[in-house]
Image (spheres, helix red, strand yellow):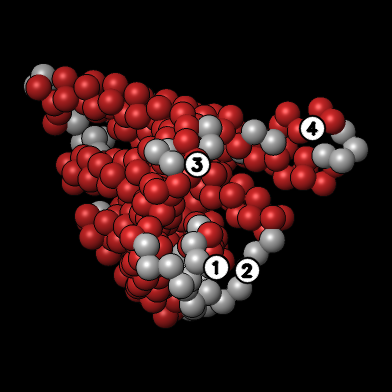
Amino acid sequence: MWLCAAYNETDSSVDFRLCQDFGLILSVFSLVYLLVCFPLGLCYNVLLVVVNLSNKVSMTMPDVYFVNMAIAGLVLNLVAPAELLSSTFTRWHAWEYNNEVYITMLILFNISSLVIMYSTTLLSLDYYIERALPRTYMSSVYNTKHVCGFIWGGAVLTSFSSLLFYVCNHISTKMVECSKMQNKEAADAIMMFIGYVVPAAAVLYAFVLILRIRKESTPLDQDSARLDPSIHRLLLASVCVQFVLWTPYYVTLLVHTAAGVPGYIGGAHYLPTYYFLRCLSKLLAFSSSFAMPLMYRQMNKNFSSKLQRLLRRLHCRDRSCPHERSTVQQVVT
């Protein structure tokens, strides 16, 4: 796996043994993720989306963002098995993907990462607006749904550099100019700046504003239209978890961009360590697809009631459910 093939298998050098050890460790981590984290993430993401969309009347602004992140998590769940079962991540690989499949998975991964990071960022900013002006239309559920649509559109456009790289692989022999678009370091630099630097700066700014609001006690603090205090803890936890899980991946993009080529990273001696950390950082990024819905399930007080409401609705089927009508009326009120 990785560059282990570059070493002679009969060679007992430290580099070869280190490469083999890293391969074994990463193989174990990948299999643990596929056996434990992948099914949990898939189930909880589907549950989060279904429960909230079946209770649209009671959805709040944070719920819309978390549904958006759950959909992006499902896309990551689609990419994760295909990549983790390849020879890049595990010794006991099930298949080898070609260049076209690699670029497709890269595009899906980039889109998901952008959607997750910007949903987290805009959740922070909208939460500040909600605390400062609790009855404003700016952070309403209606506007948030449209914002999430723009997030997906922006993520697709930002991933256009990867799409150009994919197209140029097929027409590079016909167009000399296309070779200039095959600069992966430039694409990584774009992803690093747009996908991490901008969201990190915006989240930091939003947190400064939120802390300033929390220090200032105003009559609006007793407004019934304010979000539940547990949402603040959920927001803080979700932002911290997202950045902890995604920061290593973007750091590897920064290293790859600054180095230009992997061989620049201290010579061939450090290549096994570099590729191990790079794969491990991507595995951490995949972990966000199950960490976020699991945290939402545990910290959102309204999720259990929504789930029970959905189960009662499924139990009633076509029959009339008086308790369902009364619950919806209370929510609307």
Q: Please tell me which residue is depicted at 39% across the width and 48% down the height of the picture.
A: 269
Give the position of the C terminus as an image quadrant. Answer: top left
Q: Earlier in the sequence, mark 4 or mark 3?
A: 4
Q: Are marks 2 and 3 in contact (CB under 8 Å)?
A: no
Q: Please tell me which residue is depicted at 43% across the width and 67% down the height of the picture.
A: 11
Q: At label 2, which amino acid type do we have?
A: Glu
Residue nearest the observer in this picture, 175 or 268: 268
Q: Residues within 10 Å of mark 3 (few under 14, many from 20)?
A: some
Q: CA distance from mark 2 to mark 1?
A: 6 Å
**Which mark's residue is nearer the viewer, 4 or 3?**
3
The number of callouts visible is: 4
- Label at residue 96: 2
Q: Are marks 1 and 3 in contact (CB under 8 Å)?
A: no
In percent of width and height, residue 304 lies at: 27, 64
Residue nearest the observer in this picture, 33 or 153: 33
Q: CA distance from mark 4 to mark 1?
A: 29 Å
Q: Please tell me which residue is depicted at 34% across the width and 24% down the height of the picture.
A: 201
Can you say whether 187 is above or below 22 in the image? above
Q: CA distance from mark 2 to mark 3?
A: 22 Å
Q: Are marks 2 and 1 in contact (CB under 8 Å)?
A: yes
Q: Earlier in the sequence, mark 4 or mark 1?
A: 1
Q: Residues within 10 Å of mark 2 (few under 14, many from 20)?
A: some
Q: Earlier in the sequence, mark 1 or mark 3?
A: 1
* Residue extending farthest right: 174
The residue labelled by disc 4 is 178
Q: Are marks 4 and 2 in contact (CB under 8 Å)?
A: no
Q: At label 4, which amino acid type do we have?
A: Cys
The residue labelled by disc 1 is 86
- Label at residue 262: 3
